[in-house]
Image (cartoon, rainbow, N blue to C red):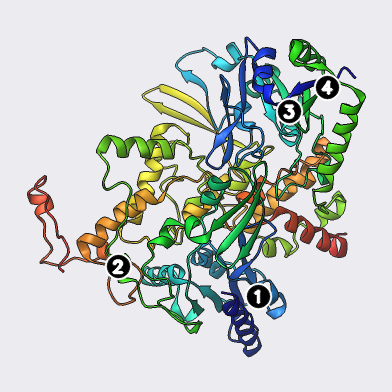
Amino acid sequence: MNERIVPRDAVTEFALRIAPQREIVGPTADRTGIRYDRIEGPFQLCLDAGHGVASPKGVLFPQTEVLFRFPSSEPNETIAEPRERVLFGIRPCDARALALLDRIFQSDGVEDPYFSARYAATTIVSLSCTEPGPACFCTSVGGGPADPAGSDLLLIGIGERLLARPVTQTGRELLESGGDLAQPAASEHVAAAVEAETQATAKIEPVEYPTDLARLAGIFHNTVWDEIAATCIGCGVCTYVCPTCHCFDITDEARRGRGRRVRSWDSCAFPSFTLHGSGRNPRERQAARLRQRILHKFLYGPERYGEALCVGCGRCITGCPTGIDLRSLLEAVTVIMNVEGA
Amino acid sequence: MREVEEQLRSEVVRLFAEGAIDLFLGYSSSRVPLRSAACVLHDADGVARLVWNRTCTPNLAALLRELLRSPPGATGDAPPRIGLLAKGCVSRSLVTLMKANQISRESLLIIGVDCPGMIDRHKVAARVGGEIAAAIWSGDDLAVRATGSGEHILSAEDVLLDDCRTCAHPSAVLSDRFLGEPRAPRRDALDDPASSLTEAEPEERWSHFQGEVARCIRCYACREACPNCFCTECFADASDPRWIGVTTDETDLALFHLGRAFHQAGRCVSCGACVSACPLGIDLRMLYEKVNGDVKVRFGTDVGTSLDEPEPLCRFALEDDETFMTEPGKGGRGMGVR
């Protein structure tokens, strides 16, 4: 399978070598663990402190983005000349999430040119998880600690070495340019990678989530939503740290005919998300908003794209200020669905 | 705390049995290490889930308005009688909310406790340099296993929330039942506004502030976790007029945090719920401690400790010193009548 072996202590050198002309973005040490930032030299990459409070989605789908300025017909700089980038060392769940976003941002025959241009110019080198976090449940939603989906090249940690497994043609070419830093892998390395994946998988607690879509739709009016939302305070942490949440708002900031059109993240957890100009709010209560978030991921997502819009990264769980645990919510909803859903 | 936790469970069972409460608002255990969750009980069945430990950081008073407005499963028109667990800061939030006519005393059955101080999850994360995979308490010591960096032994005192470190009223100041022994207010802490902003030079303060708010993702967890943020429409959300932009540009971020801070002057009970809620670990306390400390010094108020005393910024007295208006720049102080 053209796999290679890269020494763990040479990983930054490897990253810089395979992407000499490109910007490298990867996990760097931060007070809350890691954050995704530009890598320009040694000692910056921080590969063993988890996947971070915030996901790398902001690299390709910035929280605030100026679409264009007016009066002017100049397109946004993203579209004019997308930067060639390597996203290095993100986790398989996040790589999978970016692939999902790519599908969403070009669904119904309408392409989001801003995201698409960035995604097309980005090469993804992901790193497998050997120590899953306390809220990880990727294995329950189709992923895994060494899931190749969405990656061009996958690095699997085996002790002091990394097994580099190309997933796409781009990944193969990237690995070729690693030169002597990427030696051919022996069968024992491949076996060790299988073992590492098995061990990591065993550490992840499975979660039961609703998969019977008709029955899930059937409990839309159930009181279970009120119960699970009782302690939801309506902040946007879960949606903003989520690697697949992608709702946005568009605002014109204008003064005397000059200004800019800005796209910024929005959140279904906020009352203003659905507030009509008339003053009516179809999602008046927090329970309706939380229901929307869960159904978008586990009902509308599967209906439209054939898969859940959740990669099981657990960020909404560890980030929730009042300790709401998506795993527990899904289990509670599943129980009710099995009893009540028609 | 273990004993109080046991007492709490039996007290809640008794309250439900007597029909004294319709709901109980407390803390339950979490599947995430070193965290607790806010929890609402409808009957005594879930009482075993209740916990009282050093990770009970959310300020439960922030959840009351929504519960009183639209109680889950409520059928009648009458608002439910809510029992809740109140540590010192939560009880002071209840007092401020009552004075602001946001909640009524009659709708609550307050179970007061003394609080030894809560741990700051961001401090723990900074100490261990990774995600907390598991944690075990042994008295006040904490063994933490972190992803990527192995095991660490910490003392609760080392990772206490700053607000808990300087807390003057660790015991509930208002309650219907008190579990355990109340502690007298810590008078030494009262005189310590403890703001990291007060002593630094202006440039230094500004750059610290800018560096902190640059981390903000505008999730508004700080606002929603705060009992004081009860405005029907926040200035940050208003679209007509739009006071601040929606972006994460420097100006918008600074305006949001400065606006929120000014609204906390003389009202913040220093519960640390916003600090705990912030996913990015922003030093939000610097601002609130500064504005709140100023009101404390000038008016001699102790936020949330008296139901009778009017709020400092909601009263007017002829004797109030007005030199700050008539002779600006001369350091006019002592606006309060005290």
Which sits in the foreground, B193 or B124? B124
Chain where mark 1 sits: B
Secondary structure at badge 1 equals loop
Q: Residue at x 63, y 87 (%)?
A: B14
Q: Is residue A335 above or below residue A66?
A: below
Give the label, 4 or 2, closer to the camera.
2
**What type is the residue that disc 1 sits on?**
Thr
Q: How crowded is mark 4: few (under 14 residues within 10 Å), some or many (20 or more)?
A: some
At which x and y percent is residue B238? 44, 45
Task: Give the label on residue A167, or none.
Answer: 4
Q: Foreground mark, 2 or 1?
A: 2
> Would you identify the image quadrant in which residue A170 lies?
top right
Q: Callout 3: helix, strand or loop?
A: strand
Question: Does mark 1 fall on the same chain as mark 3?
Answer: no
Decide which of A256, A100 is in the foreground and name it. A100
Indicate the amino acid at tag 2: Asp
CB under 8 Å between callouts 3 and 1? Answer: no
Q: What residue type is labelled 4?
A: Val
The residue shown at (36%, 70%) is B304
The chain containing the residue under callout 3 comes to A
In-image side of A71 versus B134 (left or right): left
Q: Which residue was labeled with disc 2?
A: B188
Q: Residue A126 carries which label?
A: 3
Query: Label 2 neighbourhood size at 10 Å, few (<14), some (14-19), many (20+)?
Result: few
**Circles 3 and 2: CB distance less than 8 Å?**
no
Element carrying mark 2: helix
The correct choice, above or below, for A202 with respect to A4 in the image is below
State how far apart marks 4 and 1 are (Cα): 56 Å
